[in-house]
Amino acid sequence: MDKKVTVIGAGNVGATAAQRLAEKELCDVVLIDIVEGVPQGKALDLAEAAPIEKHDAHLTGSNSYEASAGSDIVIITAGIPRKPGMSRDDLIGVNAGIVKNVSQQVAKYSPNAIIIIVSNPLDAMCHVAYEASGFPKNRVIGMAGVLDSARFRAFISMELNVSVENTHAFVLGGHGDTMVPLPRYSTVAGIPITELMSKERIDALVKRTASGGAEIVSLLKTGSAYYAPASAAVEMAESILKDKKKILPCAVLLQGEYGFQDLFIGVPVKLGAKGVEEIIEIKLLDEEKAALKKSAAAVEELKGVLKKLA
Ligand code: APR
């Protein structure tokens, strides 16, 4: 294929993202991991499924970054996932070191790539990747809002018994307990859900969305969600690879937008061939602004932890 995407971390999220990229025939895929044999084995297994799945994407696995050279996009999923009782923030000590090292390698071998970060705690890991890669801000993007919005959409569809395709949702802010689902901008066939559900039911869905990751962790017990996170990362990659210019909520570096300075946080952006092509500032009510501010404060706090770790 004429596009190349490298997925770093051939674990649950990484391997699932590789599968979705290949089966949608978006690009050739390189899987990289530190564990010997795992990226090679998973890439070969996926390649052997290709005749049945009917795609011609080439899949390769490697422990060396040379295989990733010249990638158009690099999706970073390397790191540890959380276990029951852990918050995403608890991962910061281990994952900051991993994401720093990985981002330096990405910058060396794929200097023109667009990085999509999946490793948690998401917004803090975006700061690490931005600094370690030295890439411009339009080429470092965090995957969180698309996943959180998909979870909100799934719950709206279950609640109202309507097609998921009719649902649209917006979740802004950091990827944690303080995320900001916006019911006013969440719709079913264009109708705001505030017209379709009671405040109590909306509040319940908002709460379930904010703890959506923890709900999966408590069920799986040995790790965290990966099907929906992989889908979300691939939707972002597809918009970039095809220059679709989709408006998606993503974690990007704000420099004045929404009143925040030098902070990665989730806001609606336009994703195209250049990566982040526009940050869209939507009007927020005072209470929504306050919620976003609280969420930003939580990300600022993690930035402080990163400074201490450095
Ligand atoms: N370089 C490359 N790969 C690495 C490195 C590294 N320095 N360190 C760890 N890995 C690999 C592991 O070997 C493992 O295969 O990252 C992979 C992570 O996979 P899983 O443990 O299955 O975790 P996963 O569920 O995929 O989550 C990965 O994404 O959603 C987030 O919170 C989640 O931070 C976690 C990340």
Image: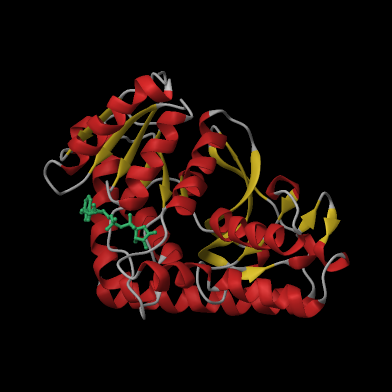
Which color scheme is applied? secondary structure
Task: Pick the residue in front: 14 or 110.
Answer: 14
Picture layout, residue 61 above or below residue 260 = above
Residue at figure coordinates x 80%, y 65% from the top left: 184
Task: Pick the residue in front: 105 or 121.
Answer: 121
Task: Judge from the rendering whether residue 299 lies leftward or rightward of residue 164; answer left or right.
Answer: left
Task: Judge from the rendering whether residue 260 lies leftward or rightward of residue 197; answer left or right.
Answer: left
**Relative image position of residue 3 (x, y in whole percent):** 42, 24
Picture layout, residue 27 above or below residue 202 = above
Task: Pick the residue in front: 166 or 2.
Answer: 166
- Judge whether residue 142 can be spotted in this image: no
**Relative image position of residue 100 (x, y in whole percent):** 27, 57
Picture layout, residue 67 above or below residue 90 = above
Picture layout, residue 158 above or below residue 292 = above
Residue at figure coordinates x 18%, y 43% from the top left: 38
Residue at figure coordinates x 48%, y 29% from the top left: 24
Task: Judge from the rendering whether residue 75 lies leftward or rightward of residue 272; answer left or right.
Answer: left
Question: Looking at the image, how many numbered discs can be counted on the residues?
Answer: 0
Which image quadrant is residue 73 in?
A: top left
Q: Ligand 1 is located in which of the four quadrants? A: bottom left
**Relative image position of residue 234 (x, y in whole percent):** 48, 41
